[in-house]
Amino acid sequence: MTTLLMITILVSVSIAVWQITKIFQVAQLNKKVDDSQVANEKDNDWNGKLMFAFLVFIYLITIYSFWEWGDVLLPEAASEHGVDYDRLMWISMALIFFVQIVTQALLHYFSYKYRGRKGLKALFYADNDRLEFIWTIIPVIVLAGLILYGLYAWSNIMNFEEDEDALVVELYAQQFNWKARYAGADNVLGDANVRFLQDYDGLNLVGIDSSDPNGLDDVVVQELHLPVGRKVIFKMRSQDVLHSAYMPHFRAQMNCVPGMITEFAFTPTITTEEMRQNPDMVAKVQKINKIRYDNSQELIANGEEALDSYQFDYLLLCNKICGASHYNMQMKIIVEEEKDFNSWMSQQTTFAEVIQ
Amino acid sequence: MGADAHHHKETFITKYIFSQDHKMISKQYLITGLIMGIVGIAMSLLFRLQLAWPEQPFGIFESTLGKWAPDGVMDPNVYLALVTIHGTIMVFFVLTAGLSGTFSNLLIPLQIGARDMASGFLNMVSYWLFFLSSVVMLASLFVEAGPAAAGWTIYPPLSALPQAQPGSGLGMTLWLVSMAIFIASSLLGSLNYIVTVINLRTKGMSMTRLPLTIWAFFVTAIIGVVSFPVLLSAALLLIMDRSFGTSFFLSDIFIQGEVLHYQGGSPVLFEHLFWFLGHPEVYIVLLPALGITSEVLATNARKPIFGYRAMVASILAIAFLSTIVWGHHMFISGMNPFLGSVFTFTTLLIAIPSAVKAFNYITTLWKGNLQLNPAMLFSIGLVSTFITGGLTGIILGDSTLDINVHDTYFVVAHFHLVMGISALYGLFAGVYHWFPKMFGRMLNKRLGYIHFWITAVCAYGVFFPMHFIGMAGLPRRYYTNTAFPYFDDLADINVVITIFALIAGAAQIVFLYNFIHSMFYGKPTVQNPWKSNTLEWTAPIKHFHGNWEGDIPEVHRWAYDYSKPGHKEDYVPQHIPLKKGEKELQH
């Protein structure tokens, strides 16, 4: 029914278009010469000046944004490669801002400076091979540098070695939560597949193959604990749709793809406790709690519950659209000293214990 | 074929509905595109309200979304549907068909000196397929479980499994059907453009004398023919997976308490197929806008476009590179990291021709005599947003840096500026510039200025702050950010963005009013209102099928003899023969 309605509407729109065209043709008959809708000297003048004002506007919005919101940019990197990442990011940013400031200035200044005047003729200037060579070769050189640096960093991040010391953790994604599986004492994850999910009355949370001995000491948890200073190799899986494991503080992200295992590795360098003491983070948390306090006052006035006060924690977010509750698919990450990690781990139940 | 051959008797239906006249088809494309644009932009305003004031009741939600906004609060599934359809409509229906369809149709025959497209019939079929696909897409908004909601990239398995979200039922089927029809339309259109440009140029119109608009449309059509069929194959395979139980993109899935039978497929394959079109699509959207800008800038600067050869070369370079960079959308998809390196390399190469274009535009303005008509303002605005948006591509195209900003608002800011706003500015520049050619009347310039300046300020107001929330780590496609207290300090930025978006939306009403009002009551145009060199301004104001009475004008020079020394006027149209001793530029 609604489809029919839509078709009717669209047909009537087309008829309206036809009628409009028809009316236009009738109106064509009594035409007179009129260039009042072409820009004249006055229009050129005020629009040219506005072009200059617009340049000032672009600069101001840039300065204002950095002044007001600069503190939200890239929080301190909490992983080893994150420091390299940030360096490359700020180099690229500096370059971008330099080019942006210069080119926007030229564009808008020329638009202002050469605003049209009556009786003036433009310069007939169609080509200059040398100039064009220059502004082809400069981007080539600059980009070559960026590409080399980027590729060097990329291969360092992505080509990690599976050394003995590294901690192997599986991140397991499903609509709409995360689970983590630790490889246990043998540091080898047992085989797993979604076909095993229904075994053991749903207690087999990530579908471990119970016939694989490597899996028996695996530990499945809902909160990710990582020891500081030790490389973690993540193996990502998803049981339903695409998800993406995004850990912004560690400059880490990888999609979780049903039917395959994807990988990412990093070494956390700052514990959760240390990060909470970080002056920038303290200021940020204070700011957030001020906002939450103000919002709570409003909620209380409306007879609703106040918001909890906020304490910093590292986050794992889902960053690939995955359905209705995509916006709330998260897991807390706790980075702690090795001994704290070990004592936490010893309290967890292994897969063998779960299925007994 | 002479003009007479085209002067067969036209009935109401053949002239206005199933017209084979490229000028009428161009108007049909424009008006359908504008209607789709209104829908697409209105949707973005709805979800911007939700983002600024999450989970607040709004009367407008109740009246527009009905049962999907119980008590006026938007449902998360509808939020995703709005984002999805906004993206689909803006990218394909407005900026591909609305922009390229309108101006390729209007300008290719008129600027190369042809009486019509090579096949008027295919051209007509192309429009009506586009119309049909628009109807199917709009109809999908009204199905029981809602329209497609898996994002405009419709990655499976989310888009393949009705269990995964309500929008992946009938809504997604209609989305796929609509796109399949759309692709057929686009292919027919593109083939026609290519054949027309190659075969139907008037005497003297060598390839090196083509206006840059035509170069851009021509190359765009080639990219379309190369890449759209791949999306069609992806869509067909997805339909197979959805309806016939095949496993092209699906494997090892457990959903709603059930293990599904799919084995051995890979969603990454879909991503490859999708982006094989998806990335060239960016240039399918952008190149026509750049072509229009080249023409409008040169005409209004009263100067030759600077570096014609370099401009053509960069269009060709961009077109070639655009087909080998798709993987930069997939750096963290799980594909081999080595492939990521290759795509980083090719992607950053694209910055070179893009930079050449930007510098050439700026140099075209230098020492010009700028006639700041509304079309000219939009073209300058395009260069500005093209630079601002393009520069952040250096970050996103770098696989390393992409890791942390991938799928955040940083990406949203980047592509909206570089292809969304830029292409929209191109569309507006084209409409302001060629409205007299299309409708025989002028748009009101004062309303045009108001439209431009409000839009220009708001475009930066909306998208500049998005870089900040993106670099703070805020993912896109989140219904609300309140689930993460960590992002609470970004809430006020989202309010600022939404306010700018609402003002920008209001400014478009000024444009629509101007457009409709001027069609009826605008000042009648003169023959060549912008004193332009190209051939379309030699055709009579009153349209008839065949474009020129009598012979088609012959071309004697390139399109950019503006302010050429030795001529009294500051423009020399292409059909004016060279004076004795006058040299044509070597280009």
Image (cartoon, coloured by chain):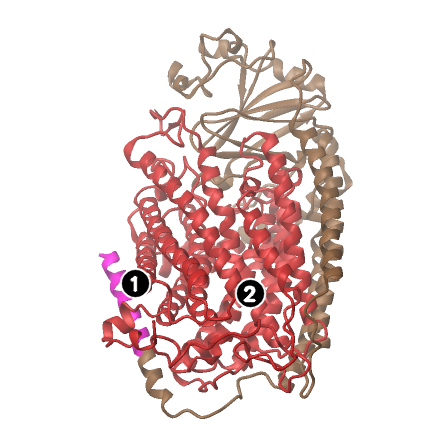
Using the image, determine if residue B333 lies above or below residue B229. above
In this figure, which residue is indicated by the disc labeled 2?
Answer: B212
Secondary structure of the residue carrying numbered label 1: helix
Q: Is residue A11 magenta?
A: yes
- Dominant secondary structure (helix, strand or loop) of the stretch shown in magenta: helix
Colour of chain B as rendered: red
Q: Chain of mark 1?
A: B
In the drawing, does residue B151 fall left or right of residue A128? left
Q: Chain of mark 2?
A: B
Q: Residue at x 67, y 81 (%)?
A: A116
Residue type marked 2: Leu
Taking the view exactly as shown, the residue that stands out farthest to the front is B580
Say which chain is brown: A
Tell me which segment is drawn in magenta.
Answer: A1-19
Asked whether B432 or B521 is in front, the reply is: B432
Q: Position of residue A106 (x, y in %)?
A: 73, 66
In the drawing, does residue B577 fall left or right of residue B43? right
Q: Within the image, what quadrant is residue B472 found in?
A: top right
Q: Residue at x 53, y 81 (%)?
A: B445
Where residue B121 is drawn, which disc sits there? Answer: 1
Asked whether A321 or B383 is in front, the reply is: B383
Secondary structure of the residue carrying numbered label 2: helix
Residue type marked 1: Phe
